[in-house]
Amino acid sequence: MLPYLKQAVKNLFSKPSTEAFPAGDPPKAAEGYRGRISYDPNKCLNCGMCLRVCAPQCMERTIEKLENGDQKITFSFDMTSCTFCAMCADFCTTKAIKLTDDYMIVGTKPEDFIVSASFVKKAPPPKPQFTPEQIAAMKAKAEAAKKAKEAAAAAAAAAAKEG
Amino acid sequence: MFEKMIDDSMSKSPWIFHINAGSCNGCDIELVSVLTPRYDAERLGFRLTGTPRQADIVVVSGPITVQTRDRLVRTLAQVPDPKCVVSLGSCPCSGNVFKGSYAIDGPLEKWTHVDVSVGGCTPKPEAIIAALAKATEILKEKRKEMRK
Amino acid sequence: MSVLMNLFHVLVFPGLLFCVVMGVLLSGLDRIWVARMQRRVGPPLLQPLYDFLKCCGKETIIPRHARKAAFLAAPVVGFVALVSISLFLPVAGQEAVFSGSSDLVVILYLLTLVSVCMIVGAACSGAPFAGVGLSREMVAMISYELPFVLVILAVSSVTFTVTGNVPQSFSLQAIVDFQAANGALITRLSMIPAAIAMLLVIPCEVGNHPFDVAEAETEICEGTLSEYSGAPLAIFRLTHMVKMYIMAALFCVMFLGGITTGIVLLDIAIFVLFCIVLTFITSSLPHAVCARFKVEQVFKFYWTVVAGLAVISLILVWLGL
């Protein structure tokens, strides 16, 4: 008991080892800390690999069809559901998902915990539309080109015979 | 004047009661570490009580398992008003990796009103302190409302 | 005039107000010191007051199985009994308000009444944890009562050599007068073991950390207080704080009495300083250094070591040292 007594009295006159946190800024997290997810929609390929590897199924993908045929794809990550295992970041081929060192995941509403972003996936270009006359003309053109090709081939064969 | 003093001291002396509703013990350890010399929540007046009757802030950790559900509801009913419920970690909010299990009857929002949630698996002690500080403000507001 | 004077004594000094102020001060200082010894910053000095006020502002729940009247009356009776002790103490060179013969015995009974009120309150709350807590509180009471009585016997046997009158030798006023004439009792060789025993009795009597077996919050859910909430709990907390002051004051009167300068305020300042130092020795140091004892360890410790010290003191007095 005596060594403890000595230590206690010594501590009485030394500085407390408490962090000043609630007064100032929160201290920085350790290197490699896995905190709040950041998602860059411009890099995303929409491969869906993250959805497959996520154990607690914290992410949701909604596909919304726009009027011009494009697709608006929204990824939302629920931070109250995440286990911060970083599997999604490992499997992301373009590194669109990253885990930042922001650990202050505190809020009073569910919206405070959603990390969400969306991007627009362009539809393939539309097929050109032709009238029947145009089609007939194009067919005739193609026929003529074919014939000309055949004629040229025949001429070449004849020249080879003669030669 | 006396009433105003009580209002002021409401946010200065919040006592915590901790319910483990099937937690893996990670969040429980981090909650205790809030009271260690490094983080020292006692300087803000926090104290860990052993009984729900004396609690102001109820901290719930763990997905609500079927076995703990009834006890959780009963314990929450024993806390005198004004009270504040803080859900600690990802589990009580959503079920985390246990989501969809037959043994889970969550989330916590289904059984009580959650005032402050902390995300993280587990949250850092700084985040827990920030959440508890937010809860004390809510506690003060609730006391003012209760008086009216 | 005398009615007003009595009212002043009961309500202000050395009664209710002085007790509460000293209780809050000592308990706040104790918490800060314990924090500093554990290298923490510690709560503000008025933290016990905040705790008290907050508990007043909470809803009071009376359990269904509780005996309502006794459940609510127990804390109030205990608190009143405790504050009335302060009227028997001739603190800081002042005469005690209720001075008379054998008042040490009255103090002993009133101190027991405080613990008994806690036990009654716990028994009336109808909770199993409170039941465990009250049985532990009883064991703690039995543990510290024996050495406490022996210490009181040792102190009064010193004054008995002068007064030659048994009821008069149990009077605190006589003890203080004796000390004023012959020097403080702690300076006598025969009284040093008794003083150490009294210092060891104080933390258990108050229910402070290493001996708070009855309120072990981690094991038995606050024990005796497990069903209390709101204002009754606030009064129990206040009782605990005031008890710290009362025990320190009792030690001052019994072993450090008779030190007067003639100026009232200076006397009070010296007395407050003594109380603060005693709180540091009896509450803060054991709290920071020791872990909580088991019930049987408390019993063994008090009935062997502490009671032994008190008996040694009695023998030394008998030998005339």
Image: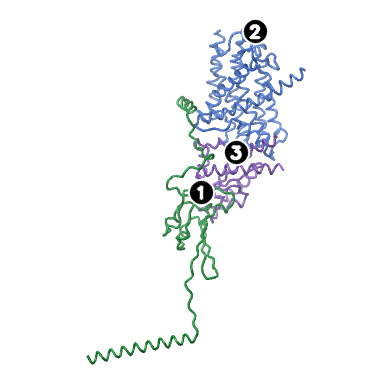
Chain colours: A green, B purple, C blue
Q: Residue furthest left?
A: A163
Instruction: Decide: is B37 above or below C286.
Output: below
Give a yes or no on whether discs 3 and 1 share a subunit: yes
Q: Nearer the viewer, mark 2 or mark 3?
A: 3
Q: Which residue is mark 2?
A: C163
Chain letter belonging to callout 3: B
Chain letter belonging to callout 1: B
Q: Which residue is mark 3?
A: B15
Mark 1 surroundings within 10 Å by alpha-carbon count, few (fewer than 14), some (14 through 19), many (20 or more): many
Question: Which numbered dot is residue C306?
Answer: none
Label 3, label 1: how far apart the Cα atoms are: 23 Å
Asked if residue C45 lies left or right of residue C79, the reply is left
Task: From the top left corner, tell me how far across and down residue A107 is, in percent.
Answer: 57, 49
User: Considering the numbered disc 1 on the image, is that residue within a helix, a strand or a loop?
Assistant: loop
* Nearer to me, B120 or B24: B120
Chain letter belonging to callout 2: C
Instruction: Decide: is C66 above or below C154.
Output: below
User: Considering the numbered disc 2 on the image, is that residue within a helix, a strand or a loop?
Assistant: helix
Mark 3 surroundings within 10 Å by alpha-carbon count, few (fewer than 14), some (14 through 19), many (20 or more): many
The three-letter amino acid code for the residue at tag 1 is Gly
Instruction: Decide: is C188 above or below A106.
Output: above
Q: Residue at x 66, y 44 (%)?
A: B142
- Rendered-image quadrant of the N terminus of chain B: top right
Residue B128 occupies which quadrant of the picture?
Answer: top right
Q: Which residue is mark 1?
A: B120
The three-letter amino acid code for the residue at tag 2 is Thr
The three-letter amino acid code for the residue at tag 3 is Trp
Give a yes or no on whether discs 2 and 1 share a subunit: no
